[in-house]
Image (cartoon, rainbow, N blue to C red):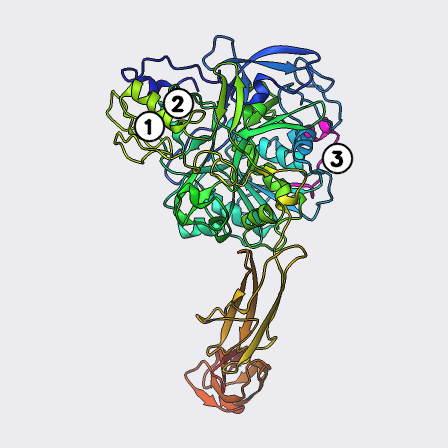
Amino acid sequence: MTGTHAAWRRTATIFGAAVLAVGVLTTVAANASPSRDTASTSTRYVKDVRVCPGQTGPHTMQCYAIAQVPAAKSAPGAHAVTVHNSARSNASGAACTGSNSVGFGPSGLGYTPADIAAAYGFNASTSSSNQVVGIVDWYNDPDVKTDLNSFDACYGFPAETSSSFRVVNESGKASPLPSKNDQETSVEISLDVEAVRGVCHTCRVLLVEANGPSDSDLATAENTAVRLGATEISNSFGRPEGGATKSTLAGFNHPGVVITASTGDDGWFGWDFAFDSNEDGSQNAASFPATDPDVVAVGGTSLDINTSTGARTAETVWNNNGTELDPGDGGATGGGCSTQFTALAAQSHYPGFSAAGCGSHRLSADVAAIADPETGFDIVDSDAPSDFGPPWFPIGGTSLASPVTAAMFALAGGSGGAAYPATTLYTNAQLSPSGLKDIVPATITTSLLGTVTQTGNSYCDEVSVSTCGTNLFAEAGTHNPNALFYTDSGDPVGLIDCSWPHTTADVNESVDSTECNTATGYDGPSGLGTPKGGLRLFTSTAPTVTMTSPAHPKLHTAATFTAQGTELSGVTATLSSSSYAWNFGDGHTSTGTSVSHTYTAAGKYTTTLTVTDSLYQIVIKKVTITVGEKASVHYKGSAKLKTHHKGSFSAAGTTTPNTGATIKRYHWNFGDGHTASGKSVHHAFSHSGKFTVTLTITDSSGVVTTVKHHVKVKS
């Protein structure tokens, strides 16, 4: 982290102001005037450290976790924090009471499961054993179950069993697990599983450890999680969108499964990388898979909780990246307009979406939750790097927001039949706005900047875009942040603020775009907002749909398919005949509640019914049927014969009801070059040996059934 500002220092001839130390800016009210108990406190110096390295190659992911780790007072990025020593923590952060109460975790810095439950208003003990929360990560954490049991014991949760917690490789096997393990990955894994368990005490947890961070490995792991029964899957990783293969996209498209994905820790379009000497500039793109409309994109907030009462005192967009002239690397929620994916209809029709300027494209995020490491969550990881201060330490990033959101979906009962559960969020935001807390620009106080207004996740952040441009022009001779260049290389910094033209021209024109600035209602940094007063935001609103198909559809004969959809009570959506779209799997489609279709070729077909109501909620039903099943054959024939002695061979064939046909031909091949036709035939073999007699039966619809029989012939 200490090199993060080096790239910006290359612009020293542009900026005369000194670059601020990383992490000195603590941008949430909780850090400046925390609503926390102050009994038995001490001061410690810490810095925010990204857990995982950046991308290791094309089409590879990086995890989105930031840990708050001990640091020397003089270390770059170090800042003072108040450690709250309590009955649950001591100087080494090792003691626990076994009580899941509000307060601080064993590190004395991070929130507890009870804090998060109280802030968002849900009951973490809701019976949810029918929900399986899948977690996809890469490499192996050899002590993940031991650490999870330590976490459970600290808060008085039951010890894990083979059914409550399971670890498999990307193929779904208990062994061998990935041979590689590293300390950074173990931190991400511990964060994910402990966040899920902290939010949903009775859910089953399935950890799928992929072989590596490649698109292909992670898509395989996603498919495995679904195959093994995951009802929700959390993905705390991403990469700049673009270039995903069909198989990768298919891995994140599982209708009826809640799939959450982090929007990233580097602000709009990954602009914070523009000031990292180890990177080549802004990522210039939003993060995939969060931009995929098949998943729920989860942004991050700074959550201030009164740890004496559990009440949420404030929640703002997470952006610790500093001032517009002196950007830091404290992390910020990601997001932005996709250039690859079309928005879900529920999103594109939601009030306020068009103001972001994405056109028909997807905007990330859909929803937001706790992510700021300065108001993070205490985890235990015995394999963490030693400078993290293990075993207990606070952690954040949108890596935290994703599993927290997936677990809240699980508490609410999962997808409830919704094909793409992100739509559920938009429906509930309109039907039950009381279950939603809007994240809006907030005036906050920081030790470094005093009182500022935090607005979004871009470069300009806490000042208006016009002020940002004026300040920038005075220092750099350009109003447009996207027009900055590195002075030593002449390379552009890249896209760092959505409100300015996406060019390198000095254009003194800007729009306070909600793509990267919070606003009343929907916006890019926080999506719809965060849950309030319970789980209403996540409770399914999808219609109940029943589908019937013929048990034995006959070849060349019209078959009838029917469907019935019923909206849930209180859901003001409607269904019409055109709401029901049928795909019969043979290239033909239809619409309506009762349709007929004629299959003209034998085979197995998957008939898909897609029901879309007036609120753009989608339910998908599928059934596999066989058309033109093979005939049932009763065969008689000699198994042993002597040469030149005639053997008797006969057969009786019966077609199944769904062929709608009769047997037209019996053809015999005796394996010695001779053939015959008929239900009953005779044949003499002219030489000894083992022969395979093949009977081929053809019915009037063209369905062919083949039966084989072995005959041993002796001299």
- How many other residues sit within 10 Å of disc 2, few (<14), some (14-19) or many (≥20)? many
Disc 2, disc 3: CB below 8 Å? no
**Disc 2 and disc 3: Cα gap in Å?**
48 Å
Rendered view: 303 above or below 538: above
- Mark 2 vs mark 3, foreground winner is 2
Distance, label 3 to label 1, CA atoms, is: 52 Å
Q: Helix, strand or loop at disc 2?
A: loop
Screen quadrant of the N terminus: top left
Q: Position of residue 540 (x, y in %)?
A: 63, 51
Q: Nearer the viewer, residue 639 or 276?
A: 276
The residues bearing labels 2 and 1 have C-alpha atoms spaced at a distance of: 9 Å
- Circle on res. 51: none
Which circle marks residue 158 in the picture? 3
| Residue at which label 1 appears | 481
Residue 152 is a magenta residue: yes
Label 2 with label 1: CB-CB less than 8 Å: yes
The boundaries of the magenta stretch are 149-165
Dot 3 falls on a residue whose secondary structure is: loop
Q: What's the residue at 50%, 89% (across, down)?
A: 664
* Residue 319, image x, y percentages: 48, 27
| Dot 3 or dot 1, earlier in sequence | 3
- The residue sitting at 40% across, 21% down in the picture is 327
Q: Amino acid at mark 2?
A: Glu
- Taking the image as drawn, is residue 468 in sight? yes
Of pointers 2 and 1, the one earlier in the residue sequence: 2
Mark number displayed over residue 324:
2
